[in-house]
Image: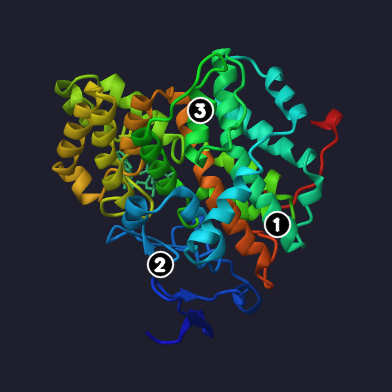
Amino acid sequence: MSDSASLKIGDKESGYPIRSGTIGPDVIDIRKLYAETGCFTYDPGFTSTASCDSALTYIDGDEGVLLHRGYPIGELAEDSSFMEVSYLLLNGELPSKDELDSFTYTISRHTMLHEQLMQFYRGFRRDAHPMAIMCGVVGALSAFYHDSTDIADPDHRRISSHRLIAKMPTIAAAAYKYSVGQPFVYPDNSLSYTGNFLKMTFGVPAEPYEVNPVVERALDRIFILHADHEQNASTSTVRLAGSSGANPFACIAAGIACLWGPAHGGANEAALNMLREIGTPDKIPHYIERAKDKNDPFRLMGFGHRVYKNYDPRATVMQKTVREVFDALKVSDPVFEVALQLEEMALNDPYFIEKKLFPNVDFYSGVILSAIGFPTTMFTALFALARTVGWVAQWNEMISDPGQKIGRPRQLYTGPTQRPYVKIGDR
Ligand code: CMC
């Protein structure tokens, strides 16, 4: 490809450099466009816009490829752990055994919450959505950990990143405990990151809690699959919030708020609710017809993706994990059969074929999480827990970039042109 692009507006032609990454589409660097032409680009939803340089995650949506620091997600999900992937995302390379042990130890030393912060929960209604609690409690962390909010100091950034990754399971588990009226279970640092989360969620002080290794592995894998996903809506939200110099706890709270929406992280909850509503395979054709009807707002939740126009590689791993968890827990749920048949029917339907709509990560995750015992309202909270590592890694990458600027998009103004103010008595 050429190394520059030209744009002709009327008689005036201007040139713009084309930049290449290591793989993936080139970008036309239009930073001087406004100064040279007086025009903005127009791209609502950012379908053709690269907002930053990033060396963390690569997606080829046409081929169904997802790489973290170059490593395929399928291989990471099969052979690594969430702590290892977290280290990889934060530091750029896979850790040695000693590095991983040291990182895991450091994270485990930050799992407790300031005791005063535990009082926050009591201000919420018992039926509050866990994501509402997460937004509030994570935002409040900045009021407790002043000693790690100087974003210009790399040590502060590292400590606040570790704190966020470490405390998120404690915060999410406490949100669950509060909703079911059980006492909070404090962290147990003798357990793995994921085992500790399971104990804080499902353990009770009155009885010993045994972590089921199959469930622990399955949940750890779900965390790996959700760890990072390039410049998605919540990650872009974290970057935009962080671009103003806001502290990391506030930025991650902003990411959580964005993730909650049903088009993004909220889709796992919506997908399972949809599968339960469908209930039996004979109802599937009716719901497929509804999804295709332009006059019906219903969409197949857990289907379609802005970037993947092929099978989401995370959905492949999820589907396999459902079977493992069902076998280990000796459970069956008719909803899994509905999901399998719905997938098959949709993938053979011309509407879904033409629009390249495939199952995404959220299509099967709810089936597994429900089998483990999580209520649907916790699904998005688990997504937030896992995505926190991606958010902090992306935030760190942005703050470390010397060319970083505040994010400030422009607009196509369509309101009234200037007009004189009319005093209230004269209207
Ligand atoms: N069911 C039925 N039709 C769909 C669906 C669906 N799930 N998804 C997209 N379409 C249609 C849509 O109606 C549109 O048709 P037309 O071109 O005739 O107007 C076309 O496909 C393109 O859709 P779009 O909304 O313009 O595409 P987008 O890239 O803006 O949206 C999406 C992507 C994920 C928001 C969308 O596919 C969707 O709403 N899916 C259901 C929600 C979901 O599963 N979200 C989780 C995404 S993966 C986890 C994450 O990253 O957070």
Residue 371 location (% of width, % of height): 33, 25
The N terminus lies in quadrant: bottom left
- Residue labelled 1 has its Cβ within 8 Å of some atom of ligand 1: no
SS type, badge 3 = helix
* Number of other residues with Cα within 10 Å of mark 2, as a class: few under 14, some 14 to 19, many 20 or more: few
Q: In the image, is residue 274 above or below residue 181?
A: below
Q: In the image, is residue 9 above or below residue 93?
A: below
In the image, what residue type sits under mark 1? Arg
Q: Which residue is mark 2?
A: 70
Give the Cα distance between marks 3 and 1: 29 Å
Q: Which residue is mark 3?
A: 199
Q: Within the displayed image, which quadrant is ligand 1 positioned in?
A: top left
Residue 20 location (% of width, % of height): 45, 79
> Image check: 196 left or right of 154?
left
Residue visible at 41% across and 29% down in the picture: 269
> Which quadrant of the view contains residue 340?
top left
Residue visible at 38% across and 51% down in the picture: 306
> Which quadrant of the view contains residue 361?
top left
Front one among 384 and 16: 384
SS type, badge 2 = loop
Badge 2 vs badge 3, beta-carbon distance below 8 Å = no
2 or 3: mark nearer the eye: 3
Do we see residue 411 in this rendering? no
* Number of other residues with Cα within 10 Å of mark 3, as a class: few under 14, some 14 to 19, many 20 or more: many
Q: Which residue is mark 1?
A: 157
3 or 1: mark nearer the eye: 3
First in sequence: mark 3 vs mark 1 = 1
Residue visible at 47% across and 83% down in the picture: 6
Residue 191 location (% of width, % of height): 51, 37
Front one among 237 and 14: 237
Give the Cα distance between marks 2 and 1: 24 Å
